[in-house]
Amino acid sequence: TAVLQLPNSGSRLSSPAVLRAMSSSAGPTPPYTTLAVSRPAPAVTHVEIHRPDKRNAMNKAFWREMVECFSEISEDQDCRAVVVSGAGKTFTAGIDIVDLAGEVLQPRGDDTARISYNIRKTITHFQESFSAIERCPKPVLVAIHGACVGGGVDLITACDIRLCTQDAWFQVKEVDIGLAADVGTLQRLPKVIGSRSLVNELALTARKMYADEAKSSGLVSRVFQHKAALMAGALEMAEEIAGRSPVAVQGTKINLLYSRDHSVEEGLQFMAAWNMSMLQTADLMKSAQASMEKKSPRTVAFAKL
Ligand SMILES: CCC/C=C/C=C/C(=O)SCCNC(=O)CCNC(=O)[C@H](O)C(C)(C)COP(=O)(O)OP(=O)(O)OC[C@H]1O[C@@H](n2cnc3c(N)ncnc32)[C@H](O)[C@@H]1OP(=O)(O)O
């Protein structure tokens, strides 16, 4: 199992030291070769995709490392919110096309059944890389700058909050390289964007969507002028979330996801079953008292979860 080594700067909100910690000057953090993982502020984990020379294209190691990284984060009681971003010029160029052509799709097996079985295994393995983000109980914010292509759209639709720069663009590129997107976009994008027609248009034509349309369609919730402002904004939001009761925050993420995929009635039943135990937390009284005293929940010390 991978072990995260997180430098804990303990710096104040969006201070220059924090933003330096979120810059991409350092390389990937061992044991990872494609991810730089850091702790730019207490309880906030920053996962930076780090293959800037290849525009953060998703190679074989990346798909594996995302699963390892988000499994670690899910279990890390010192982490309460996560920011994902990309190093260098652009967020990501999607799947590594060299890997795709050279290795991923190389037939493995003696007959059609065995070859197909192995391809299915690969696709499922790749899907897991982004489902691990969705399954992570800590809220995951994603900060997108420049290009977000193919697998990048699959990735961001598995995140809880999407923020981007004015120069960001999004492209469901898969039809252009001869395949139907298979690691989450076709399943999650329709749940993110209200307009089914727009989803269909983007997926069937592979046209680029720029930041303003991403905002007006609901793909992102905020647009920042440039990358420094984006990272500062993402970190500030992550710190706001991390400062609140982890019982409340994680329960909110889990129930929002559950209700996305179930009827209102099923969601209400799940919620009641969830909160019949979670309402017994000490966090509730602590938070309520702070609220009555007109203090921020960030002034309250919550136990680890
Ligand atoms: C079972 C499969 C499941 C997954 C499916 C996923 C599907 C997809 O992701 S489909 C989309 C695939 N991606 C693309 O088609 C994008 C290709 N790249 C680009 O269009 C441009 O690179 C981009 C607009 C992102 C950035 O342009 P820029 O001018 O800034 O950079 P470049 O000079 O083009 O590239 C710099 C070096 O990066 C290498 N590179 C870029 N993209 C990829 C990639 N997808 N795979 C591998 N390598 C990539 C590029 O070759 C350059 O390398 P070098 O020549 O060594 O400097």
Image (tube, rainbow, N blue to C red):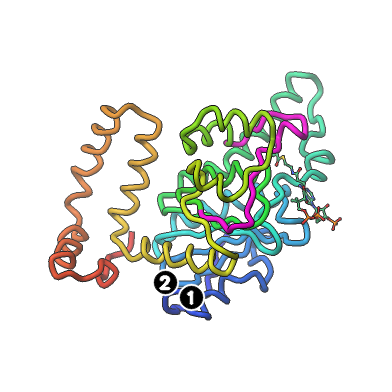
* Classed neighbour count for the residue bearing mark 2: other residues with Cα under 10 Å, few (<14), some (14–19), many (≥20): some
Q: Is residue 230 magenta?
A: no
In the rendered image, the quadrant that contains the C terminus is: bottom left
Residue 68, percent from left and from top: 57, 52
Q: Is residue 124 above or below residue 148?
A: above
Q: Is residue 7 above or below residue 69?
A: below
Look at 80% across and 19% down and name the residue there: 111
Look at 66% across and 56% down and name the residue there: 146
Label 1 amino acid?
A: Asn
**Relative to 142, is 169 on the left or the right?**
right
Residue 137, percent from left and from top: 41, 50
Residue 8's tag is: 1
Q: Is residue 171 magenta?
A: yes
* Disc 2 Cβ-to-ligand 1 distance below 8 Å: no
Residue 238's tag is: none
Label 2: element kind: loop
Q: Are marks 2 and 1 in contact (CB under 8 Å)?
A: yes
In the rendered image, the quadrant that contains the N terminus is: bottom right
State the extent of the magenta-drawn residues as a range: 163-184
Q: Is residue 206 above or below residue 84?
A: above
Q: Nearer the viewer, residue 219 or 105?
A: 219
